[in-house]
């Protein structure tokens, strides 16, 4: 198993120049003169994307159109930011006389907000039209507007740049996906090697094989390999798996001859990128109905993948999937159909610094897919009587087709 994600990924460093050109074009199209973010980079994927500096507390990112960006951090974070950030112009709060600003007001929090506003005025002046994300702090926006600055909350500025991945980002996702596949393969082996007990319940080491134990296995192995397992990874068995978002209760016992959905999406602890993959297996013999569902999903996935290339419209790819499923006798939710048996969700989504990001692939995805976008393709069929079957690969869109970052084969019966 690849246990060296940290050392492997440290060489995959983006330069700030990789994103500056995209940002300048996007800002010009939005008719704004500067981009301003004030947030931490643990929770804000945009801030981490722009800086690659991981900080738990808010700091300033500021970029005027056609100029290099700056970041302003606390004195405590200053040395680390200089070493880690891909933004080369790193400044400290002390460069802006932080202590004087905070001491000048009775309320420290309000003083800190006024201090941030003073930085923006000093760097941009009062006449600049400033773009901020919708998540921007309202109180800070109010203070800036009171100072005479024009603040425009704008959707999708950094997200648009993040829609396509450079070679370093793709390689990072590929490495995380390799770990995902190795751990998932081991988990499937755990299920395959289990014994069948009373009422077809699976047992491992003399105890019931529960969803909780399988999730604990994933958690331990993923952490061992530098990845953060999510609490809500999906391990769902039997009729309960007919709910696409049923994550599985800890005490649920896996059973033989029933579909088991494994939807696993780890995140690199160091590099912050995600990956996503789903496999459906049956310990023992699948019913004729489940086999038919599985074959239809395989066919729909293959047809969807064949329809993908740079320039392909997302809704057209979704239609290809629905056509394949409906031809096999299953309903879909396109055109507003209320479906209780069949495919009840869209086809895919972007993956990167967020597990669900642009672009989406579904009925209302009227945009063209871009070269070097990384997306999932995950058709599924669900029947409350027997359960669900879903298969999910993660791919990179290429000029003439796609590159599948998922190498793990699909096998129903184990």
Image: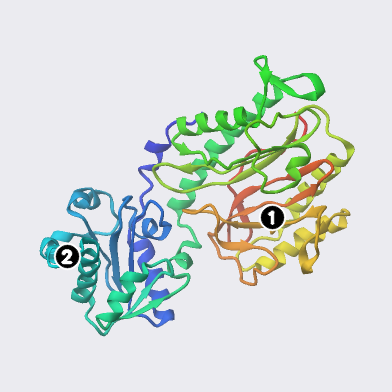
- Give the answer, above or below, for where 206 lies relative to 48: above
**Residue occupied by mark 1:** 305
Answer whether labels 1 and 2 touch (C-beta < 8 Å): no
Q: Which x, y percent locates residue 119?
A: 20, 70
**Residue occupied by mark 2:** 106
Q: Residue at x 24, y 80 (%)?
A: 147
Colour mapping: rainbow
Badge 1 element: helix
Residue 196 sits in quarter: top right
Q: Quadrant of the C terminus?
A: top right
Q: Residue at x 76, y 47 (%)?
A: 298
Image check: 70 left or right of 191? left
Q: Residues within 10 Å of mark 2 (few under 14, many from 20)?
A: few
Residue 140 sits in quarter: bottom left
Badge 2 element: loop
Q: Which x, y percent locates residue 293?
A: 82, 45
Q: Which x, y percent locates residue 137?
A: 36, 67
Nearest-to-viewer mark from 1 and 2: 2
Asked whether residue 365 is in view, the answer is yes
Q: Residues within 10 Å of mark 1 (few under 14, many from 20)?
A: many
Asked whether residue 65 is in view, the answer is no
Q: Which mark is residue 134?
A: none
């Amino acid at each position: 198993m690849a246990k060296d994600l940290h050392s492997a990924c440290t060489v995959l460093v983006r330069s700030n120049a990789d994103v500056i050109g995209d940002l300048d074009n996007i800002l010009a199209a939005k008719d704004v003169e500067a981009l301003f973010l004030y947030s931490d980079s643990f929770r804000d994927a945009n801030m981490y994307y722009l800086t690659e500096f991981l900080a738990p507390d808010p700091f300033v990112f500021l970029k005027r159109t056609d100029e290099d960006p700056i970041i302003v951090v606390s004195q405590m974070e200053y040395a680390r930011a200089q070493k880690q950030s891909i933004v080369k112009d790193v400044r400290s709060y002390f460069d802006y006389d932080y202590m004087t600003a905070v001491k000048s007001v009775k309320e420290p929090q309000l003083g800190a907000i006024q201090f941030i506003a003073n930085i923006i005025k000093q760097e941009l002046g009062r006449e600049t039209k400033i773009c901020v994300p919708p998540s921007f702090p309202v109180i800070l926006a109010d203070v800036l507007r009171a100072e005479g600055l024009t603040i425009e909350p704008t959707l999708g500025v950094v997200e648009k740049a993040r829609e396509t991945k450079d070679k370093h980002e793709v390689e990072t996702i590929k490495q995380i996906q390799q770990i995902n596949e190795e751990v998932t393969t081991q988990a499937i082996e755990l299920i395959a090697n289990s014994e069948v007990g009373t009422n077809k319940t699976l047992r491992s080491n003399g105890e019931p094989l529960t969803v909780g134990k399988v999730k604990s296995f994933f958690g331990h192995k993923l952490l061992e390999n530098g990845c953060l397992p999510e609490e809500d990874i999906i391990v769902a068995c039997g009729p309960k798996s007919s709910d696409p978002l049923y994550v599985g209760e800890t005490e649920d016992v896996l059973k033989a001859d029933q579909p088991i959905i494994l939807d696993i999406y780890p995140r690199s602890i160091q590099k912050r990128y995600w990956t996503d993959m789903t496999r459906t297996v049956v310990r023992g013999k699948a019913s004729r109905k489940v086999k038919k569902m599985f074959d239809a999903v395989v066919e729909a996935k293959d047809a969807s993948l064949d329809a993908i290339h740079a320039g392909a419209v997302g809704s057209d790819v979704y239609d290809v999937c629905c056509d394949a499923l409906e031809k096999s006798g299953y309903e879909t939710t396109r055109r507003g159909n209320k479906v209780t048996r069949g495919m009840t969700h869209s086809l895919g989504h972007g993956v990167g610094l967020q597990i669900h990001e642009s672009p989406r692939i579904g009925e209302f995805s009227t945009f063209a897919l871009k070269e070097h976008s990384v997306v999932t393709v995950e058709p599924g069929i669900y029947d409350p009587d027997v359960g669900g079957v879903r298969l999910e690969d993660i791919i990179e869109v290429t000029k003439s087709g796609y590159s599948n970052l998922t190498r793990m084969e699909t096998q129903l019966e184990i």
